[in-house]
Image (cartoon, rainbow, N blue to C red):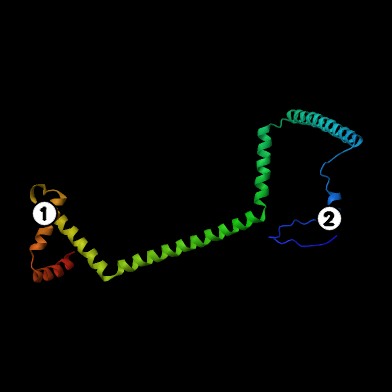
Amino acid sequence: METRQQGLLDPEPVTEVDEEMVSDVDLNNTLTDEEREEILSELTKLEEDISTLRQVLASKEKHHSELKAKLGITPLIEFKQNFNRSWYDMQTSTAYKKTSETLSTAGQKTSAVFTTLGTAISRKFGDMRNSPSFKSFEEKVECTVSNIKQTKVGSQGGGGSFEEVLSSAAHASAQETPSNNMSESSDHERTC
């Protein structure tokens, strides 16, 4: 036979057919009556075997559940045992151990960061409290409180509310002159 390649646009179909390919493919799928009988017989035996195995399995499962009932093993107890076994298996896995170690290390580092941060904040507050501006502010507050107390105690007839005393102290200090304030503040520092 002639071997010829067909192009995509070639109008003539390929006429050569591979003989081995034709013999391998059985398009009609024809069986003889004997072969058909044999296959049906084998299929029937397999179905009977499957049915027998299902009956045996059902019998075994029933016996299994009866034995568990005699031992007092309930489905809840089984569930707990399975859960505990699964939990144990998970905890002993390498992935769980690595994750646990990573989280532990992260927790330690976070704790160290917060400790360092707390120490730094505490140190900054200490530095701020020892600064001259904070001491000056603290002295002014102490003097103001002292003046308010003296005004409150020294006033006749019970004085008034805290707000009234505070506003009168603010009004009095606003009326003082700057040079007067300087000399009085040095006097106040001595008395406060």
Residue at image coords 38%, 64%: 121
- The quadrant in which the C terminus is found is bottom left
The location of residue 98, given as percent across then percent down, is: 62, 58
Quarter of the image for residue 56 reads top right
The extreme right residue here reads 34
Give the mark, 2 or 1, whose residue is nearer the N terminus: 2
CB within 8 Å, label 2 to label 1:
no
Q: Classify mark 1: residues with Cα within 10 Å, few (<14), some (14-19) or many (20+).
A: few
Residue at image coords 13%, 71%: 182
The location of residue 101, given as percent across then percent down, is: 60, 58
Q: Nearer the viewer, mark 2 or mark 1?
A: 2
Q: Classify mark 2: residues with Cα within 10 Å, few (<14), some (14-19) or many (20+).
A: few
Question: Is 40 or 68 nearer to us in this picture?
Answer: 40
The amino acid type, in three-letter code, at marker 1 is Gly
State left or right for residue 130 relative to residue 90: left
Q: Is residue 184 above or below residue 65?
A: below
The amino acid type, in three-letter code, at marker 2 is Asp
Task: Check disc 2 and report the residue beneath it.
Answer: 18
Task: Check disc 1 and report the residue beneath it.
Answer: 154
Q: Is residue 7 above or below residue 51?
A: below
